[in-house]
Image (tube, rainbow, N blue to C red):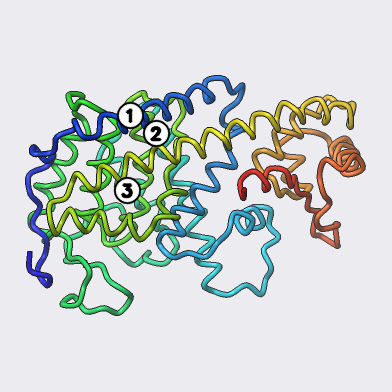
Amino acid sequence: MSKSKPYIPIEFPPKDLTLEPFIKKIVEANRGVALFDGILRALPNPDILLAPLITNEAVLSSKIEGTQTTFEDVLKEEAGITPKNISPSLKEDLKEVLNYKKALIYGSQAIEYRDLSLSLIKELQKILLTNVRGRNRLLGEFRKTQNWIGTPGTPIENARYIPPDPIILPEHLEYWEKFLKSDDYPDKIVQLGLLHAQFEILHPFEDGNGRVGRLIIPLFLYWKSLISSPSFYLSEYLEKNRTEYYDRLLMITKDNDWSGWIDFFLTAVIQQAKINIDKAQKLLNLYNEMKDRFIQATKSQYAIPALDAFFKQPVIDTKSFLELIKAPKKSGIEVLNKLVYSNLIILRTPSKGNNPAVYEFAKILDIINA
């Protein structure tokens, strides 16, 4: 492939890829996902308990693309206490991360009643880029112009990689979707690895391709019934190993090295499964421990709703807290005061004028940032 010419994809899925060398890792990856799913099935309310992991996935997947936002930055923004003097760049970063979270939640809800498809993927890209950098690009539609990958300002002749010409893109997207819907491939995790790589190789959108490609990972696993909730996120491993992630994708286009990519992807799933299991188990343990402590501290009917509220928003203002627990103002504030007095939560910012007080449940931040 000439460096300054668009890549022409070889047959997909690759027929010369043999899975025998990966049997051990395939078994280990499937076991890891199954163990994580075992925890998911044991959770009394996964939407509440895993809410912090959704936010963290949005942060890390966006970080791979260069954003500088932290988990705590997003919590501050959702609580309405982002400092007014933050840089325009950080403001844009926050918008992108919150859009990623919206797209992930939208996709998770959508596949309850419809198939994962190119149509849904276009909707996710539109949500991802609405009112953020790149909003002037084509939203919710596949590109009709040539794009390329390189450092900002790099001319196409010096690009690291030039995706396929838009003229041949529809044909290859058709092959991709056909494989997406196939139930005949020997292993679904390998199938997902192939799909993720080919999506990044095709780079079908003008912008947002990396993040959309990573959104597909938990949605595919849920859609194909490998997990009972679309909550297996891979971006933490991919972000930590970003250089190899990009290099392995590039080696497919340079040397047709699908084996190297699959080896990397299976390793990613194996290692990330251990991390996900550990964090989900710690969140479950924390929730079970705090149930009794919140009840003892508050002696209120709103104790468990309060705990649920802090799992959903570990940094939260009084107004949002009252809305989530559906309590009268006096009762809700009494609960908050008792939780602060018992050192279960922190009063982060006292109320001032029209600005409500802000509280923090620090134990969740400790688990996510560990």
Q: Are marks 1 and 3 in contact (CB under 8 Å)?
A: no
Nearest to the eye among marks 1 and 3: give it.
3
**Which mark is drawn over residue 161?**
none
Mark 2 or mark 3: whose residue is earlier in sequence: 2
Q: Residue, x 60% and y 25% (percent of image)?
A: 45
The residue tagged with tag 3: helix, strand or loop? helix
Residue highlighted by disc 2:
110
Q: Up-down: is 15 above or below 252?
A: above
Residue 63 horizontal side relative to residue 217, left or right:
right
Q: Are marks 1 and 2 in contact (CB under 8 Å)?
A: yes
Mark 1 or mark 3: whose residue is earlier in sequence: 1
Whole-angstrom CA distance, mark 2 to mark 3, is 17 Å
**Which mark is drawn over residue 114?**
1
Residue highlighted by disc 3:
213
* 26 and 343: which is toward the camera: 26
Q: Up-down: is 262 above or below 97?
A: above
The tally of labels here is 3
Where is residue 135 shown, x and y percent of the image?
Answer: 37, 64
Q: Residue, x 74% and y 30% (percent of image)?
A: 305
Q: Amino acid at mark 1?
A: Arg
Whole-angstrom CA distance, mark 1 to mark 3, is 19 Å
* 47 and 362: which is toward the camera: 362
Where is residue 287 shown, x and y percent of the image?
Answer: 70, 30
Nearest to the eye among marks 2 and 3: give it.
3
